[in-house]
């Protein structure tokens, strides 16, 4: 291990690179960029979706949105780390749970024809279905529901939205779950549902 100090970029430098890499109407092609890992950056996304830089919350929603557009998870590289990537730099950051939070959703249709479109805390919109699946983990007493937003990036569905989802749920083949986009996503075995 070297005693050389690790140089990390400033948020301003990454912001400038992100602006250069893409525009506000579409996402930059982060899946096509493959610079070597530059190091770790003191940036963290908390479980509640708050972004921190050097221990302080980033209070500019436009800056958080901009950073979110250059976020990628390198599942096969860099030990599955979350990284901010530009054509020439890649910085590992810390993500406590999921990088985004689904803060609301719109339901259209009902039953097997139901379609759910989620909105995230950074302004993304995603219609859940086979290409953007729902999943629920049950590590503790409370289930933790997620929806795939893009790439390997998920949004934790906030509690109020999850309670609304449960109201739209149905039973199928011994499971309670949610229909959306023509697919049924299992939440909990029917026999474990509380009366």
Image (cartoon, rainbow, N blue to C red):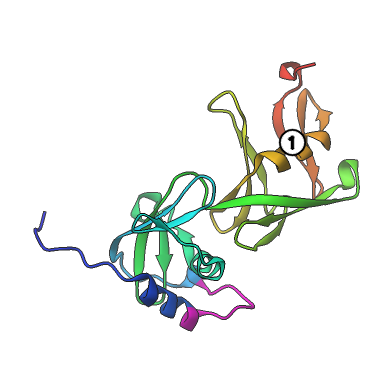
Whether residue 128 is visible to the viewer of this picture, yes or no, is no
**What span is in magenta?**
19-29
Quarter of the figure with the N terminus: bottom left
Check the image and report above or below for 158 versus 73: above
Q: Residue 166: x and y, percent?
A: 77, 34
Q: Which residue is drawn at 43% across and 72% down?
A: 33
Q: Is residue 71 magenta?
A: no
Q: Residue 87: x and y, percent?
A: 40, 77
Q: Which residue is drawn at 47% across and 48% down?
A: 46
Left or right of 57, for residue 10: left
Left or right of 56, for residue 64: right
Front residue (pair 20, 45): 45
Q: Residue 134: x and y, percent?
A: 67, 44
Check the image and report above or below for 119 versus 62: above
Whether residue 146 is visible to the viewer of this picture, yes or no, is yes
The residue that label 1 is drawn on is: 163
Our reading of the magenta stretch's main secondary structure is loop
Q: Residue 5: x and y, percent?
A: 15, 63
Left or right of 169, for residue 30: left
């Amino acid at each position: 291990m070297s005693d050389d100090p690790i140089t990390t970029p400033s948020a301003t430098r990454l912001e400038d690179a992100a602006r250069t890499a893409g525009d506000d109407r579409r996402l930059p092609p982060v899946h096509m960029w493959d610079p070597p890992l530059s190091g770790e950056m003191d940036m963290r996304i908390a479980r509640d979706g708050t972004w921190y830089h050097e221990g302080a919350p980033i209070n500019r929603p436009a800056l958080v949105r901009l950073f979110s557009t250059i976020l990628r998870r390198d599942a096969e590289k860099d030990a599955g780390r979350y990284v901010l990537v530009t054509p020439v730099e890649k910085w590992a950051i810390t993500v406590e749970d999921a990088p985004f939070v689904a803060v609301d959703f719109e339901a259209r249709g009902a039953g097997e024809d139901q379609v759910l479109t989620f909105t995230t805390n950074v302004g993304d919109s995603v219609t859940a279905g086979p290409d953007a699946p729902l999943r629920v983990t049950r590590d503790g007493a409370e289930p933790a529901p997620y929806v795939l937003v893009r790439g390997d990036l998920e949004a934790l569905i906030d509690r109020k939205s999850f309670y609304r989802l449960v109201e739209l749920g149905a039973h199928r083949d011994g499971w309670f779950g949610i229909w959306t986009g023509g697919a049924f996503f299992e939440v909990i075995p029917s026999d474990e549902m509380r009366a």
